[in-house]
Amino acid sequence: MVFVTAGMGGGTGSGAAPVVAQISKEAGYLTVGVVTYPFSFEGRNRALQAMEAIERLKRNVDTLIVIPNDRLLDIADEQTSLQDAFCLADDVLRQGVQGISDLITIPGLVNVDFADVKAVMKDSGTAMLGVGVSSSKNRAEEAAEQATHSPLIGSSIQSATGVVYNITGGKDITLQEVNRVSQVVTSLADPSANIIFGAVVDERYTGKIHVTIIATGFPQSFQKALLSDPRGAAKGRESVASSTTAPSTVRWPHRGNRLF
C-alpha cells in the first residue's frame, strides 16, 4: 500500500504526485492519494493548476482524498496565524494517512485487515476520512457524529458506496457503546453500501472513544462541487444531514470546530 501526499497547485506536488502514483499503481500497489487544494486567496491560476493535477492524479490512484484548504477558515479562529494555518493543512494530511494505516496495523477484538481496506478502497475514486474522539458522557454518539460529519472535508457518508469504520476504546468501553456507534454509522450510510467494521481495546484510550471512518465511492459531481465551492458544499451537506432521521437512541451534540 502506497500513500501519495502533496499540496496541489505548486510545481512539485502538481507535477510529481501523479507520476509517483502512476509508478505505484502500475507496480500493483493499492495507491491512495491524500492532497490539499489551495486557498481561494492563492489565486485562480494556482487553483486551475491544482484542479488539472488532481484530475491527473485521480487517474493513477485507487482512492483520492482531497482536502480544500478553504475549509480551514471554518475551524481556525481569528488568532490563527497564516503559518499556523498552513501547518494545520499539513497535519490534516498526516491524520489522513495515519487514520488509514492505524486501521490496518493495530490489532483488535474485531480486526480490520488489509483485505478489508482494499475491498473498500480499490478503484473507488473520491473518498473522505473522518476521525472523532470524545470523553463526554455521550462519548459513543459524539465520537461517531464527529467522524461521520467531517467539518473539514465537508462531506457525509450518505452517498458513499463503501465504508470502513473502526472503534477504539479502553477496557471500559461497553457493548452498548459499540452498538450506539454502529447505529449512527449505519443510519447515515446507504443501505446498499459495503460496510466493514472493526473494534480495538487499547488502554491508552481509557475514558474515551475514538472512531475512524473511511467512506469511498462518492460521485464525480461531489468532488467538483467541493472544489468549486468547498464552504458551500459543506452547508449543503449539513442541510442534508439535518433532514436525516436517526435512531431514537442517538443524540446529536453540537459539533463545534474540529479538524475531523
Image: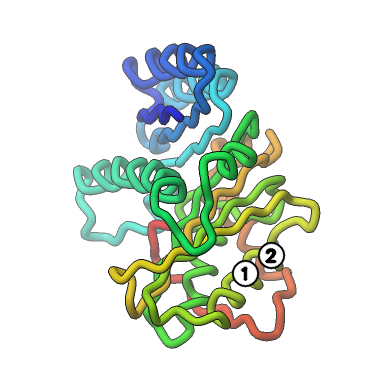
Which residue has dot 2 on it? 186
Crowd class of label 1 (few under 14; some 14 to 19; many from 20; radius 10 Å): some
Q: Is residue 231 visible?
A: no
Tell me the quarter of the picture where residue 37 sits: top left
* Outermost bottom residue: 137
Q: Is residue 71 above or below residue 245?
A: above
- Number of numbered discs present? 2
Residue 183 x/y as whole percent? 66, 72
Judge left or right: residue 179 versus residue 32: right
Q: Circle 2 sits in a helix, a strand or a loop, which is it?
A: helix
The residue positioned 70% from the left and 85% from the top of the image is 248
Residue 240 x/y as whole percent? 69, 62
- Identify which residue, 260 or 240, lies in the foreground: 260
- Identify which residue, 167 or 32, lies in the foreground: 167
Q: Circle 1 sits in a helix, a strand or a loop, which is it?
A: helix
Judge left or right: residue 203 versus residue 113: left
Judge left or right: residue 125 versus residue 37: right
Image quadrant where one finds the C terminus: bottom left
Residue type at mark 2 is: Thr
The residue positioned 40% from the left and 82% from the top of the image is 172
Q: Is residue 82 above or below residue 249?
A: above
Q: Is there CB contact under 8 Å for labels 1 and 2? A: yes
Residue 221 x/y as whole percent? 69, 36
Q: Is residue 192 above or below residue 65?
A: below
The residue positioned 27% from the left and 41% from the top of the image is 86
Q: Is residue 56 visible?
A: yes
Tell me the quarter of the picture where residue 5 sits: top left
Residue 256 x/y as whole percent? 42, 70
The span from disc 1 to disc 2 (Cα, nearest Å) is: 6 Å
Residue type at mark 1 is: Ser
Crowd class of label 2 (few under 14; some 14 to 19; many from 20; radius 10 Å): some
Which residue has dot 1 on it? 182
